[in-house]
Amino acid sequence: MKMNKYILNMRVDYTTLEDATGRVIDLALNGRGGYVCVATTHMVMEAFDNPDFREIVNSSYLVTPDGMPLVWGLRLLGIKGAERVYGPALTPAICKEASKRGIPVGFYGGSEVVLKRMIENLRSRFPGLKVAYAFSPPFRRLTDEEDKRVVWEINSSGARILFVGLGCPKQEWWMAEHKDRIKAVMIGVGAAFDFIAGVKPQAPSWMQRMGLEWLFRLITEPRRLWKRYLYHGPRFVYHFGKQLLLHSLRGSKGYLD
């Protein structure tokens, strides 16, 4: 059985929290670089609407199913043991292992307050964690000179794992643009920075298990997230429903799989 499927033409891999953590650690130890995408239905629809963005995701080292709809999608397409690999859980899992092995990590994204609180929380949980780099970029595209400076600082810091919290799709574009310039393995973890810092509430575990985290986030941040959930959500259900219908009729491995 293939260890990945294509949901609306975007690759989603079968993995677990332990497996994904181990693979990132191995990349860091081998100095291979590359980037990891933590996928939600929002990412799928961004990829559905933009072939260039879809290529960025499909070219990544690993695409984890962050949202429960993608976990259910993998199961419906034949990967019965598919599990959720959630950004706010993957980040501390990697940091825990990195602290044990002495692997320096870095953080790019979020506000200065968020970065400070997140790093404090992670260090309190994992006292041996080596944070070699942290930077809160401005809410604009960096100039060429600024970008060169950032790349130099990341590489000079010795960070082997770089968590990127710019939000989808900005963080995936950024990682793809820098994959051949930054030596660290990069993981786009979106809102994980805010959750770990404690500046935004997380949905209760029962809502997460039932795939209702989107509703909790919509209620807490309606102005910012209404389009993501009220526009992209129904479109995902419609188009993935068509994929499942074709999958069933053809008895194949999936729509455009």
Image (spheres, rainbow, N blue to C red):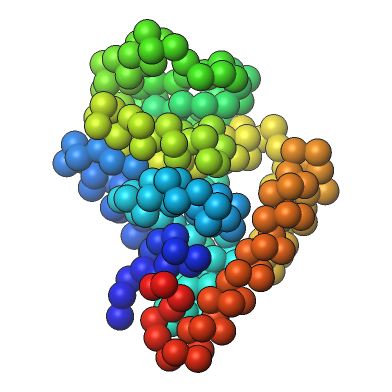
The front one of 144 and 224 is: 144
| Residue 159 x, y percent position in the rendering | 30, 26
Q: Which quadrant of the figure has residue 205?
A: bottom right
- Left/right of residue 97 with respect to residue 221 in the rendered view: left
Q: Position of residue 100 (x, y in %)?
A: 31, 40
Residue 97 visible from this viewpoint: no
* Residue 232 vertical position relative to residue 177 in the rendered view, above or below: below
241 lies above or below 10? below
| Residue 244 placement, left or right of 162 | right
Whether residue 90 is situated above or below residue 140 in the rendered picture = below
Q: Which residue lies at the image location 45% right of the left edge and 51% below the top edge?
A: 51
Rendered location of residue 93, percent (x, y): 43, 48
Residue 23 makes an appearance in the image: yes
Q: Is residue 70 left or right of residue 254?
A: right
Q: Residue at x 48, y 36 (%)?
A: 171
* Residue in front for this viewpoint, 238 or 87: 238
The furthest residue to the left: 30
Q: Position of residue 188 (x, y in %)?
A: 46, 41
Q: Residue at x 33, y 30 (%)?
A: 178
For residue 170, side relative to residue 69 (left or right) = left
Which part of the image, by quadrant, shows the N terminus?
bottom left
Residue in view at x 46 percent, y 26 percent: 108
